[in-house]
Amino acid sequence: MTTSTALPALTDIPQVLPGVIRIENADKDVAKEIIFDRTRSVYPHDQMFGEFCPINAYIAAPPREVYEYLSDTRSLEEWTYSLRGFVETDEPGLWESFDRVGGQTKCYCRTVANPDAMTVDYHCAWDQGKHLWMIYLMRVVDAQLVLNKPGSVVTWVNCKHPFYDENPYPETAPPQRPVWVGDGWDLFYAGHQMEMDNLKAICEYRADNGLPIKPDWMK
C-alpha cells in the first residue's frame, strides 16, 4: 500500500509570488488566455533579442565530429565572418586574432569545452586578454535524440553583457577606431545566423565528401 503526501514545492513561500503561474493558481482556461495574449504574429525586436541572442541549426554531420571541430579555437578562422590570423599567446589556451570588422582590432579567445556534455564556450574580448567578458555559449546535441534523424543540432547563445554598451577598456583600443563591438548588438542575430550558416555549410560539405570535419591542419 502506498501513501501520498503533499509535495514540498513552494511551501517555504507563504504567499503567491507575482508572475508565477501554476495550475494551482490559474486553471487551464486562464492559462490559455495568458498564452494566447502573449502569442503574436509580430514581435518587437527588443523583446525578442534584448538581452540574449539565440541561434540554432541542424547540421547533417556527426555530432561528436562537429563538437571536436568547434572545440578547437582555430575553427573560428573558418566559420566566423571576420576572425582571422589565430596565434596562441604565451598564456596556454589563450589565442589572439584580428577581428577585421574592427580594422586592426585584436580579439582574444579562450575555449572552454566539455566533451561529456558537448558544450563549447568561447570566452572572448576585443583589445585585451585579461578580462574575457564576451561569452559565446554553444552546445552540440545528437539529432537522433531530438529530431529522430542522424546529424547534429547546434545551439548558440550570446548574452548582452553591459560592456557591449560601453567599452570598459578604452585605453587598450587602437587609435581612432570608429566602431565598438556592441554598436551592432541589434544586428547580432542576423550576423550570427550568417556565421551559423557558414558552420553548417562547411561541416556538411566535409561530411558529404568523406572529409574529416576537423581538417588535418588543425591536428
Image (cartoon, rainbow, N blue to C red):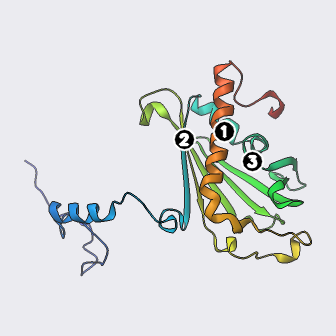
Q: Say which amino acid is labelled 3.
A: Tyr
Q: Position of residue 4 (x, y in %)?
A: 12, 57
Answer with mark 1 or mark 3, whichever residue precedes in sequence.
3
Q: Position of residue 164 (x, y in %)?
A: 68, 70
Comparing 7 with 182, the one in front is: 182
Dot 3 crowding, Cα within 10 Å, few <14, some 14–19, many 20+: some
Give the residue pinned by disc 1.
Answer: 199
Camera sees residue 190: yes
Quarter of the figure that contains the C terminus: top right
Give the CA separation, mark 3 to mark 2. Answer: 17 Å
Q: Residue at x 32, y 74 (%)?
A: 19
Dot 1 crowding, Cα within 10 Å, few <14, some 14–19, many 20+: many
Give the CA separation, mark 1 to mark 3. Answer: 10 Å
Between tags 1 and 3, which lies in front?
Answer: 3
Q: Are marks 2 and 1 in contact (CB under 8 Å)?
A: yes
Q: Say which amino acid is labelled 2.
A: Ala
Q: Say which amino acid is labelled 1.
A: Leu
Residue extending farthest front: 42
Give the residue pinned by disc 3.
Answer: 81
Give the residue pinned by disc 2.
Answer: 57
Q: Residue at x 33, y 60 (%)?
A: 39
Tag 1 secondary structure: helix
Q: Residue at x 66, y 39 (%)?
A: 199
Q: Is residue 36 above or below residue 144?
A: below
Q: Quadrant of residue 144?
A: top left
Camera sees residue 133: no
Q: Position of residue 94 (x, y in %)?
A: 81, 54
